[in-house]
Image (cartoon, rainbow, N blue to C red):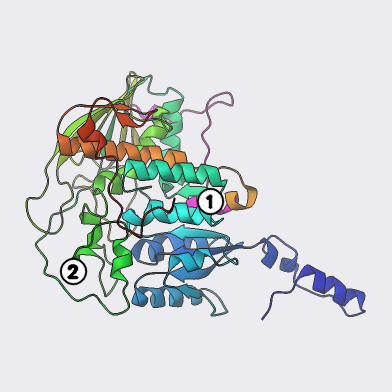
Amino acid sequence: MKDISRRSILKTAAAGFPAIVPSSVFGQNAPSNRINVGAIGVGRISRTHDLPAIRKVDYARIVAVCDLDASRLEQGQALVNGWYSVNRTKVYHDYRELLADKEIDAVVISTPDHQHAVLAVNAVRAGKDVYLQKPASLTISEGRYMANAVKASGRIFQIGSQQRSWKQFHRACELVRNGRIGDVKHVEVGLPGDPSGPDAAEMPVPAGFNYDAWLGTTPLVYYTEMRVHPQKGFDRPGWLRCEQFGAGMITGWGAHHVDTAHWGMNTELTGPVEIWGWAEFPTHGLWNVHGRFQTQGRYANGMTMSISGDYPNGIKFIGTKGWIFVTREGNVTPSDPVSGKPPGKVLEASDPRILDSVIGPNEIHLATADEHHANWLDCVRTRKEPLAPAEIAHRACSTCLLHHIAMKLKRHLHWDPVKERFENDDQANSMLSRPQRSPYGFNG
């Protein structure tokens, strides 16, 4: 059925026919006001987190899905078709064809980490607004390129740092920013861990899976299911534990927690000036991201940050008059790992009275939203800046990657957050980027 336009309805009424139509035709949910969303990547995080959240927004409609795995593409289409009365969700194997679809206003990108920055850049250049799963990029250079491209495009961009839309994180950061624990001196960030794994033999690439495009900008390596994602079901994929595609938990959950730390520290648009630390890395097996680690960062304002898997999963702000600890009630998806030291309450303080403090009308009030995807879609309509725009996304991710570089080099590093270069350290600066395999890199 074709959408009925306002013009055709008025023309029919003028001809003497009754114009009895649903109020929604002229309301905020009219076809002309609806935001048509395309989904790039319809695996675990898309099915359980991104798409269900977008579905709940009544003025948005998921009209297309794209995946390099034909089986997942078919299942993604079936999932979305099941939500709507008309089974006409478009399918694309190539994201470039989805971006060329003029019906699509915005895209949600839920792919492996190594694809994030490239897809986001191409999406905003195609005129699409973007919701991007975290972390923002595979390398610091990619992240800067992406943030610049988003700014130049004028498109609405939201990174999936949904903790900004969770009440306890907003409350914690607002209390900290308003001095309820005095001057912040130190922040502890606790992350869950990832196990190493065995070696995995080469396997035939499954029919209907474009493995070369899935590898994208990264080197060509043999296919094995343990490196990619399960062919049956949507359990946690193996690529999360391969450095070829990401840095491990330092960016996986670190992108969330460091962003929250920056929010409370008021360092969202900068980064540390000094970083050091250590990590244990597997000596064999396919999965090779970091294991146990402890890294430190010092900021220009004197604040310091420690990140480790030995802390409880969450963020602890430590000030001259007390501390505040904030964490989640659970995981993003059922297959996400949790810390070995489960926290107590989601929001705690050295003095419980701190948590009852009232933020006055003349104090700092941080922006908030009821739901992160809904905030993005509202900003797509209003063209206002969302809670987690590109520059903030890049700064959180780049800080995580700085800590990762410190893990690798195991020595003090000095960083210029304005120039985004290490000071007098060619070896460290060589780790700001990786070669991009043709033809999957940035196009100009």
Please tell me which residue is depicted at 45% across the width and 39% down the height of the picture. 391
Location of residue 212 with respect to 296 vertically, above or below: below
Compared across the picture, whether 71 is left or right of 26 comes to left
Any part of residue 153 in sight? yes
Residue 17, located in which quarter of the rendered image? bottom right
Please tell me which residue is depicted at 32% across the width and 19% down the height of the picture. 302
Q: Which residues are magenta?
A: 350-378
The three-letter code of the residue at mark 1 reads Trp
Give residue 73's position: percent from left, percent from top. Answer: 40, 74
Name the front one of labels 1 and 2: 2
Residue at numbered disc 2? 224
Please, what secondary structure does the residue beneath circle 2 have?
Answer: loop
Query: For this rendering, which residue is in front, 154 or 311?
Result: 154
Any part of residue 30 in sight? no
Residue 94, located in which quarter of the rendered image? bottom left
* CA separation in Å, label 1 and label 2: 36 Å
Please, what secondary structure does the residue beneath circle 1 have?
Answer: helix
In terms of sequence position, does the residue under pointer 1 or pointer 2 come before the other?
2
Q: Residues within 10 Å of mark 1 (few under 14, many from 20)?
A: many
Compared across the picture, whether 271 is left or right of 389 comes to left
Give residue 100's position: percent from left, percent from top. Answer: 54, 65
The three-letter code of the residue at mark 2 reads Thr
Q: Residues within 10 Å of mark 2 (few under 14, many from 20)?
A: some
Quadrant where the N terminus lies? Answer: bottom right
Residue at numbered disc 1? 376
Give residue 195's position: percent from left, percent from top. Answer: 15, 54
Q: Can residue 234 be found in the magenta stretch?
A: no
Q: Can residue 358 be found in the magenta stretch?
A: yes
